[in-house]
Image: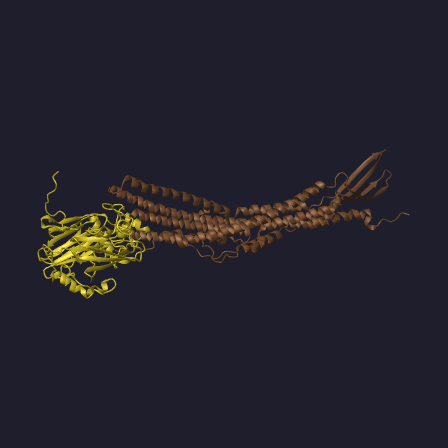
Chain colours: A brown, B yellow
Amino acid sequence: MIKARPMWLKPYLLAVALPLLAVAVAACATIPAGQDQAAITALLQDRKAETVGKGDEALAEMMTKPMTLDSAVQMSIVKSPSLALIYGQLGLDQAEVLEAIEIANPRLGLSSLSANEANIETQSLTLPIADLILLPARLTLAKQARARARYQLASALLDVQLDVEAAWYQAVAAEQSAQMRSAVASALKTSADLAERYFNAGNITELDLNREQAAASQALIAAQEAAVSAKAARTNLDNLIGLRPTDYLWTLSSALPLPTENDDRVDDLQSLALTHNLSLIAAEQDLSIWDQVTVTRQATQWLGDTALGLERERDRDGARASGPSLDLELPIFNQGQAKTARLRAKRDLAKAQSAQIRLNLGHQIVARADELQRRRQVVALHSHDLIPQRQTIVARSQEQQNYMLLGIFGLIEAKTREYEAYEGYIEAVRDYWLARVELTRLVGTRLPSTPDILEIGPSASDIVAPSVSSPMPMPQHDHAGQP
Amino acid sequence: MTISRRDIMLATGTAALAATAGPISRANAADAPSDRRFKPVRTLNGWTLPWRMKDGVKEFHLVAEEIQHSFAAGSEATCWGYNGSTPGPTIEVVQGDRVRIFVTNRLKEHTTVHWHGLILPNGMDGVGGLNQPHILPGETFAYEFTLRQHGSHMYHPHADEMTQLAYGMMGLFIIHPKAGEAVPVDRDYGFILHNWALHPGTWRPDPSVMVNFDLWSFNSKVFPAIEPLVARTGERVRIRIGNLSMWNHPVHLHGVEFVETGSDGGRWPQSQWRREVTSTVGVGQMRDIEFTAVPGDWALHCHMSHHTMNAMGHDIPNSTGVDQSGLEERIQKILPGYMAMGQNGMAEHQDHTDAGHQGPANTLPMMAGKGPFGNVEMGGMFTVLKVRDDIRPGDYNDPGWYVQPKGSVAKRVSTDPEFGSPHRKPA
């Protein structure tokens, strides 16, 4: 008596069920693209970065006012060419993930063997059973890899904003410095013109005249160099934002903000970095992935390239035979050691990279926090000490010049040194903010000490504007007592 | 030994104070004895040190100390002097007097006192380390000697001399002739020439400066703070001028031909008197000049014109002849307080400073002083001899400005630069 075959082994059932199962599983192996954008936005919002792009009308309105830090960043999240590159990379990452979770296609085998004017026809259908068994694990890994990609991309987007911020500080400072250099050049030109009058009157030597003229020429050269630097900094900023070359008419803010009132504690920054630095999080995600891959590999390496299928044959006499098939890889010559070793090496590499990023981050935060504190002190030394001292030097020099104790050239020179002190101040404020941008980049989020509103410092035009409107009025000369 | 009337008066006048203890200060100077054998010297802006008689010896007490001094209103400094002043009080004695001079050192470094030009025992000459030990801070030394000469002399430190002189330690030491004046004088003035490196904006003289000084003084005062010399018309006036500065000074008196009559070598015989209008007083010298006073306000000053200016810059570019039109406005854009000056000379400078053009703290303008006809444009070693017909003998009060007799003042005859046909140097 022929034992009835279990239903599930009935060939025609297998022929239908297996493909359907494969299709159903494959369908689960996709992730909607919209989830990526929302997740990345959430990551940025968590780090107090800009996320909402303004419309064309709002952007046009922004360009009628001076370019502030905020408007530069807001413009960049809409127009920056880097964003297209980053989102393109997101598309590539999605493709790689899809590749990683692809199941090998079923294989249909057909053969027709001829012998003695009769054919033996065979049909077979096989499915990669190993792929199917591992699919849930691979799906999980794919999701994790996708998350890693989101971290990396959010990090890149945050970097774009921070790059724009740094470029804005550079551009504003360069423009202000160029104006101060121009003021110095103008003052020394006046001094040189005056020296020429002294020389023409026969009162100073050609040597002294040329000293004044050379100083004026040197200052003019420096002013031109500063103007070139300012232009380059502005071009770099416009490029990062994604402005057109014709948008240079969008004027920059005329002054940098003053440093924040307080510093953050290094311990707090370290803790914040561990939870917010996206490069670190991505690296740790990477390690987690490779850990799981290695464990999964160790548990399932015996599966090899096993396939489950269905075979059907029609003999010469028309008899048909069909049944399931199993294609089992025998681990005789190798047990997949190479693949296992590669996976372990990747895991170890990921572990080392994660540890290195963490260590580096810790050191960098300490160094940058220290730098930030010192940059703040440098700003304070300029504003509280050097500049007031230079102003006092000018005031006391003016008194000496009033009493014919000091010549006018010495007085003008004192004034140019005051301008240079202000230029140093502008650069010190710039360096403070650049250090703060880098610290923010390391920590991975806006520093807690960042206030909502920042006080704006003096602009170059404020600095060079005269503070007293007119000199002492002259007395009327008389000849008292004449009979 | 013959006791003269002068000796009796001297002994009587001072007996009451024989038992007085402690140094005699300005405060009790009014009670100090006087020596009627001579007409007292009037020390411009200064005073004479009282003394007491003790066992036939005139005792004086000098105190070397740090003081606060005013060169003129708006110029104060920490100086060193004697008994609260620079110069220190004038010591006046008569030839033949025996003196005992206590010197108390309240400085924080050692000192001594040298009696410039005096003939005395070597151990009393006052060169620290050579003639005597230094007087250490807190110590009091006694100098004792008999005056064997007459003349106008000075006293000053001879320890860390450059520094202590630079800070103002000096004084007059006048020895009147025992036999009296060959030609008596009605008024006898004395002052010491000195120089100060009180750099603009500072409050302590710099002792290391050798040539470029900031202030030039008569008795440590500068014009217009130097006391005027006052005399009645026809009085015979003597002026004793000492020089402890670092520079020789040709002192010029307007209005008279005076005669040089003495020095720290003593009163000269009349045959050695020399007529001058300017007497150069070398460093370390004294010169006495005498004249008969004629009415008017007569300038008395060093004729080195820089010495009649207060602080001025020596290395500033010369602005005479420099047209700054157009440039002044450009400079004012960066230096609003700037005012172009000096194109036509420096006369306008006093107008600027009088109008309030601000100078460094504690610094006098280069030139100052207002006379009845306008700016005097002087500073430093400049004062005025004021002679009036109606000044009472012994009255040293400032009588105000002289009113010239009608028709005796230079008057304007034209404002046209082309006026007249003056001769020019032939081509």
Quadrant assignment for the C terminus of chain A: bottom left
Q: Which residue occupies the extreme bottom position in the image?
A: B16
* Residue B153 or residue A324, whichever sits in front: B153
Seen in the picture, residue A210 relative to A358 is either above or below; the reply is above
In the rendered structure, the answer to whether residue A186 lies left or right of residue B280 reads right
x, y percentage for residue B186?
11, 58
**Residue plotted at (34% across, 41% down):** A214
Q: Residue at x 74, y 39 (%)?
A: A334
**Would residue B140 be visible to someone looking at this image?**
yes
Name the one closer to the observer, A329 or A7: A329
Residue at the front extreme of this rendering: B1
Residue A16 against residue B6 in the figure, above or below: above
Q: In x, y percent, where is residue B172?
A: 20, 55
| Residue A418 coordinates in the image, percent (x, y) | 36, 50
In this rendering, does residue A441 appear at all? no
Residue A241, x across and y down, in percent: 50, 48
